Image: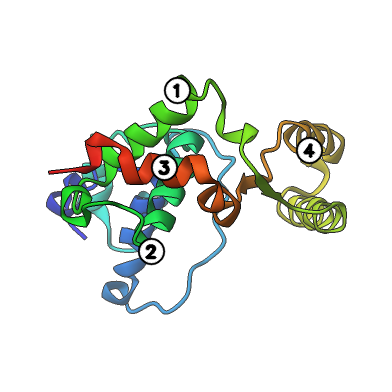
Amino acid sequence: MDAAHMHTLGGCNPFKAWSFIKSKLHLFNRTSVEVFNFHGEGDLSQRFICSLPDAGEACEGSKELKLGVANPTDVDRLHADRIATGAWKQAMYINASAVLHRREYVQEIIREYVTIERNMTFLDLPLDCLDQQKLAVLLKTSIRVGKEMLGDAFDDESLTKMFDSHALRKKFCSVNITAVLMDSSWQQFFKNNISFRD
């Protein structure tokens, strides 16, 4: 990997950087990844790249590379996209060609319909949520993995508080697309919305 390849990573998120690096392992005649301490000093990506064998040029290039901070997921956009996709699969659009290749546009119209016209949030719609048993398994697994990765530095009490807070705020829920699309007001919305016409 050389500096030119490293510059193609500029502006991408850490997962993309990792995926790129992982895809190049064969160039180093390696088939596995060694454990790397991500708690060290300095930039994580740079330290990782510089720890690779025969990666001097890539290491120098990584010193100029600044990865952007990952943005949190826009959950409303995700809910709107799932509704839009469900409506597409059920052929609910009056004119499919008007919405084809306009996914973000359709998401925005759905967001406006929920938040402005209906004066709701997506979490006010019918939801599918993890039941208490699944939540308990998820928390238990998260604590186990946290302890395996961080040992004594892992704070399971803080994780439990954060987890409980997320559960109360319905972070483990998603819109029940089937129930939404069976609702007559949503059917009318897709049938009559002028924005979905040519």
Q: How far apart are marks 4 and 2 (CA)?
A: 38 Å
Q: In this view, does 80 lie to the left or right of 136?
A: left
Which amino acid does the dot numbered 1 rest on? Glu
Q: Residue 109's mark?
A: none
Identify the secondary structure beneath mark 3: helix
* 2 or 3: tag closer to the N-terminus: 2
Mark 4 and mark 2 residues within 8 Å of each other at the beta carbon? no
Q: Mark 1 points at which residue?
A: 117
Residue count near mark 2 (Cα–Cα under 10 Å), binned few <14, some 14–19, many ≥20: few
Residue 73: x %, y % from top left: 47, 38
Q: Name the residue under label 2.
A: 89
- Give the camera-side residue of 35 and 92: 92
Q: Distance between the residues labelled 4 and 3?
A: 43 Å
Mark 4 or mark 3, which is nearer to you? 3
- Give the camera-side residue of 81 and 150: 81
Q: Name the residue under label 4.
A: 159
The residue sitting at 39% across, 77% down in the picture is 30
